[in-house]
Amino acid sequence: SELTLAIVKPDGISGNYSSSIMHIILQSGFTIQTQATLHLDEHTVTTFYAEHSTKSFFPSLVKYMTSGPVLIMVLEKVNAIADWRTLIGPTDARKAKITHPDSIRAMCGEDLERNCVHGSDSRESAAREISFFFPNLLSG
Ligand code: ATP
């Protein structure tokens, strides 16, 4: 099976969606390998989202992601990376409400930025993101 990194972002936590999201995760056949609630600082968010550092929305993204605690989980399942991306829906939660009304972002997100959850987008990013937050979990 495969591992992926899921994050319930600050708007998901403050909107009290954590338990609904965890319920959906378990109902969908994932197991939660490990989890941590953290309040990310600027340095951590900047490093995590380094690929977006030159984008115009980056300062706003850092402000959003440091605005409150997040719930970080490592999910395990066959095809976990793609299946978790499917479950969360499109990046823009406003569009998700129209095109993917059953998705997690349709349920708890607001717009293109405040989209309540994260999911690794490839095997490479899953490995990088899991070892970023849980350096002892993966071997090799
Ligand atoms: P994530 O990486 O969080 O799962 P994603 O892969 O769907 O989301 P990315 O393109 O990697 O989206 O962007 C990372 C995050 O930056 C998005 O989830 C969103 O919160 C924010 N974001 C992306 N594009 C924009 C934008 N154009 N304006 C504002 N915020 C944005």
Image: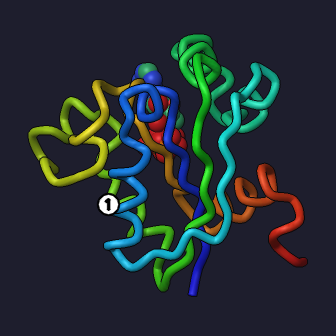
Write the residue at 62% across / 49% down. Answer: 72
Q: Badge 1: few (under 14), some or many (20 or more) residues near its Cα, within 10 Å?
A: some
Asked if ligand 1 lies within 8 A of label 1, the reply is: no
**Residue 125 vertical position relative to residue 58 in the rendered view, above or below:** below
Please state if 61 lies on the left or on the right of 83 as rendered.
right
- The picture places residue 120, in percent across and down from the top left corner, at 56, 56
- The picture places residue 118, in percent across and down from the top left corner, at 49, 45
- The picture places residue 123, in percent across and down from the top left corner, at 62, 69
Write the residue at 32% across / 73% down. Answer: 27
Secondary structure type for disc 1: helix
Query: Which image quadrant: the C terminus?
Result: bottom right
Number of marks in the image?
Answer: 1
**Residue 76 vertical position relative to residue 101 in the rendered view, above or below:** below
Write the residue at 16% across / 54% down. Answer: 102
Query: Which image quadrant: the N terminus?
Result: bottom right
Quadrant position of residue 62: top right
Q: Which residue is mark 1?
A: 87
Quadrant position of residue 45: top right
**Residue 30 vertical position relative to residue 118 in the rendered view, above or below:** below
Please state if 91 lies on the left or on the right of 63 as rendered.
left
Please state if 99 lies on the left or on the right of 119 as rendered.
left
The type of residue carrying mark 1 is Leu
- The picture places residue 130, in percent across and down from the top left corner, at 72, 59
Please state if 113 lies on the left or on the right of 106 as rendered.
right
Write the residue at 46% across / 75% down. Answer: 30
Structure colour scheme: rainbow
**Residue 42 vertical position relative to residue 74 in the rendered view, above or below:** above
